Structures are given as C-alpha cells and as structure tokens.
Image: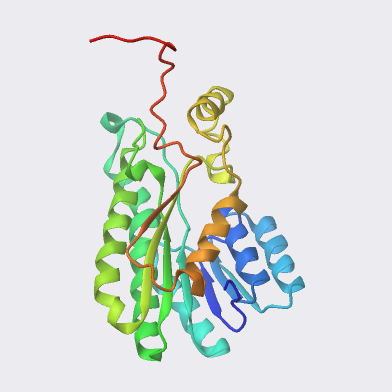
C-alpha cells in the first residue's frame, strides 16, 4: 500500500527537518526525490547521500522557492531527466516571531514569499505538468496547527498557512477530474531546525504539558503521514486538512478539580 517504486517526487526544503525526513521516507518507499532548498548545505549533502544509499535517484538544487523561475527550472530538470513528476510536496518555510503591531511591510512580504507564494508556484507548476502527463498525481502542502490554534507573534505565518489550507481545498475541487489529489498536512509542535530558537525551555515545557501525548513531535512522525498521503492508501482522500499534533488542538484540560459539581 505504501510502495512508491518508480514514482518521481519533488519536495521543497528537503535539506532539514520535516522536508528531509519526508524525502528519506519517500526514497525508502521507492521514489526518486528532487528538492530545492535555501538553508542547511551540510544537512542537504547528508540527506542527498542517505537517499542515494537507498538506491534512488536524487536532484538537490540550492535556491529560493519564493522565485518562480527557480522552482520552474527544477521542475524542468526533473521532467527532462526523469520523464515526469508524480508527487509534489510544498514544505519549504520560514518562521518569523514578531508582534503584529511591529510588523513592517517588508516583514509581511518576506514571510509570504516563502510560506505562501512559494506554495502557489509549486502547486501551479506541479498541477500543470501532472495534467499534461495525464496520469494523475499527488500534491501535499505542509501547513501548521496555527491554522486552527493561532499563537501570539505569528500573525504573518498564520495568515500564510491559512491561505495554503484554502488553496488546497480549492485545488482539490478543480483537479479531482484529472486524478490529482491535493491535501494539507498540518504539524503541531515539531523539532526541526526551523523552531530551534523559538522553542525555549519554557516553551517546550508548555508544549509538553498541553500536548495529549506529552511530547513535541519528531520530523519523522510527520513524514510518515506525508508518505501515507502520497501512497495508494490515500487514493480517495483529497482536500483534507490532516492535523499531526499529538492531540494538542483537542486538549482543553485546565486541571479542573476532581469530584467538583454544581448547578
């Protein structure tokens, strides 16, 4: 059910964190994996080597997903060298923690370049190629729990992730007739390098107390869900928003006193 042998996948931002974990998961399932990444050169080299050890083909390109021409160039190369694209995962992202009243226009546009425009470019390029191929395909957008449970200081990031969720649903309706599925995976607190400075000891303690499973996720735990959505096991799922948050969003526990009652 989770066999991807012969599939050709593009994952943006696969040098680190969730993107790297997803790239390895897909490669181990049999997919060839290409990526465009902006940060983590040493990590990218390690990821590329690990994928090649699985026997799969790789294309790793340093670049900016906020620049459509660069994303298009990667897609052209994959199509030229591998014959087409079956899976596209938009994952590359940037985090900015800053109070809304202090946000500048440059902050706003800079954050949306990677977290929204880059996703649109990837979706547009992938969808057009998949339609031309006529063999269907799978698009997965990596969203966030902030779409349903916002946090202070993340207004631009939250706006971008909410827009990605809406884009996913709209695309799913339009592309279903072409055999293309489009879904959002929304991680809760996860431990990739993206969050290294934002997750202080106090933040980690708060998360561990609020997450039903009692701990922050590892990138591999999100990657496994991405793998599922790229597999035939999810062939009848499209337009979905899949939370991978350890039960954080449902946890309204505030420590009510046991045995208390009243009218």
Residue 109 visible (yes or no): no
Q: Quadrant of the N terminus?
A: bottom right
Question: Residue 196: x, y in percent?
Answer: 58, 38
Colour convention: rainbow
From the viewer's perspective, tell me whether residue 3 is left or right of residue 120. right
Is 162 situated above or below 64?
above
From what the image shows, is residue 63 above or below residue 241?
Answer: below
Residue 142 as seen in the image, left or right of residue 7: left
The residue under the point 54% across, 32% down is: 199
Residue 205 in view of the camera: yes
Tell which residue pokes out farthest to the right in this image: 53
Depth check, front residue: 243 or 77: 243
Residue 183: give x, y in percent of width and height: 38, 63
Question: What residue is shown at x 39% (from left), y 36% (from top)?
Answer: 250
| Picture quarter with the C terminus | top left
Quadrant of the image occupied by residue 115: bottom left
Name the residue located 50 percent from the left edge and 24 percent from the top edge. 206
Rendering coords of residue 228 (x, y %): 52, 65
Q: Nearer the viewer, residue 153 or 86?
A: 86
Side of 201 relative to 28 (left or right): left
Judging depth in this view, the residue of 112 and 163 nearest the camera is 163
Spot occupied by residue 235 in the image (x, y as percentages of width and height): 43, 74
What is the quadrant of residue 55 in the picture?
bottom right
11 or 98: which is nearer to us?
Answer: 11
User: Looking at the image, which residue is at 59% across and 51% down?
Assistant: 221
Q: Does 90 sit above or below residue 31?
A: above
């Amino acid at each position: 059910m989770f066999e991807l042998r012969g599939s050709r996948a593009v994952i943006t931002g696969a040098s680190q964190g969730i993107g790297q974990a997803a790239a390895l998961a897909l490669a181990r399932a049999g997919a060839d994996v290409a990526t465009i990444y902006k940060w983590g050169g040493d990590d990218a080299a390690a990821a590329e080597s690990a994928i090649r050890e699985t026997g799969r083909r790789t294309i790793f390109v340093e670049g900016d997903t906020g620049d459509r021409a660069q994303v298009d160039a990667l897609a052209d190369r994959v199509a030229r060298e591998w014959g087409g694209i079956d899976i596209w995962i938009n994952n590359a992202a940037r985090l900015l923690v800053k109070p809304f009243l202090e946000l500048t226009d440059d902050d706003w546009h800079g954050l949306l370049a990677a977290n929204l425009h880059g996703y649109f470019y990837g979706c547009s390029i992938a969808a057009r190629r998949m339609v031309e191929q006529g063999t269907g395909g799978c698009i997965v957008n990596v969203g966030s729990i902030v779409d349903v449970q916002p946090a202070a200081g993340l207004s631009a990031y939250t706006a971008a992730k909410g827009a990605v969720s809406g884009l996913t649903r709209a695309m799913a309706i339009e592309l279903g007739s072409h055999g293309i599925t489009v879904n959002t995976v929304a991680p809760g607190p996860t431990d990739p390098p993206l969050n290294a400075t934002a997750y202080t000891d106090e933040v980690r303690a708060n998360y561990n107390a609020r997450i039903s499973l009692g701990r922050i996720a590892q990138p591999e735990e999100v990657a496994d869900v991405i793998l599922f959505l790229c597999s035939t096991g999810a062939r009848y799922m499209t337009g979905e928003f899949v939370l991978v948050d350890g039960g954080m969003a449902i946890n309204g526990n505030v420590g009510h006193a046991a045995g208390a009652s009243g009218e």
